[in-house]
Amino acid sequence: MFEVKKLLAILFLIQPLVLFATEITLDSVPPVVVSTTPKAGIANVEVSLNKISVTFSKDMMTKEMWSVLMVDGGLFPKITGSVKYLGDKRTFVMPVKLLPNKTYAMRFNSKDNNAFRDTTGKPAESYLLVFKTK
């Protein structure tokens, strides 16, 4: 019993060293969503909102590379025009038509659909956006 406790203590001390064996830098990590319009979890989005935007933490590949996916149980908004990146190379915009009193749900990237990528080719972390209109 004593040996098991001793081994666990050693593993407990070594584990933090393993977690930080590779230096984390902004360049080494994948891009993440840093903001959305509308904000995730909002329950009173104006039905007049005519675009959904997602801003990433890094410059992204902007040549028709995106993965906006439907989520079971939620509605996917009607896209009313061309989706695009803004000139900042970080903000993706979808023109949409929303309906009143509806819950919308979409995922930006997933394990199998990960076309949102930074300029080095790293796929963005998956992000779930859910909101409800007034």
Image (tube, grey):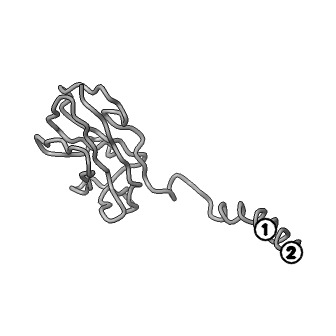
SS at circle 1: helix
Q: Which mark is residue 3?
A: 2
Residue 47: x, y in percent? 19, 27
> With 121 as the anchor, is 106 left or right in this view?
left
Amino acid carrying mark 1 in the image: Leu
Residue 97: x, y in percent? 14, 35
Q: Is residue 104 above or below residue 117?
A: above
Q: Quadrant of residue 12?
A: bottom right
Q: Is residue 50 above or below residue 129?
A: above
Q: Residue at x 50, y 56 (%)?
A: 29
**Pointer 1 residue:** 8
Amino acid carrying mark 2 in the image: Glu
Residue 40: x, y in percent? 36, 37
- Which residue is more in the foreground, 54 or 72? 72
Q: Quadrant of residue 23?
A: bottom right
Q: Residue at x 38, y 60 (%)?
A: 123
> Total label count?
2
Q: Earlier in the sequence, mark 2 or mark 1?
A: 2
* Extreme-front residue of the structure: 1
> With 123 as the anchor, is 49 left or right in this view?
left
* Image quadrant in which the C terminus is located: top left
Q: Residue at x 37, y 35 (%)?
A: 41
> With 66 as the anchor, is 25 left or right in this view?
right
Separation of disc 2 and disc 1 at Cα?
A: 9 Å
Q: Residue at x 26, y 55 (%)?
A: 66
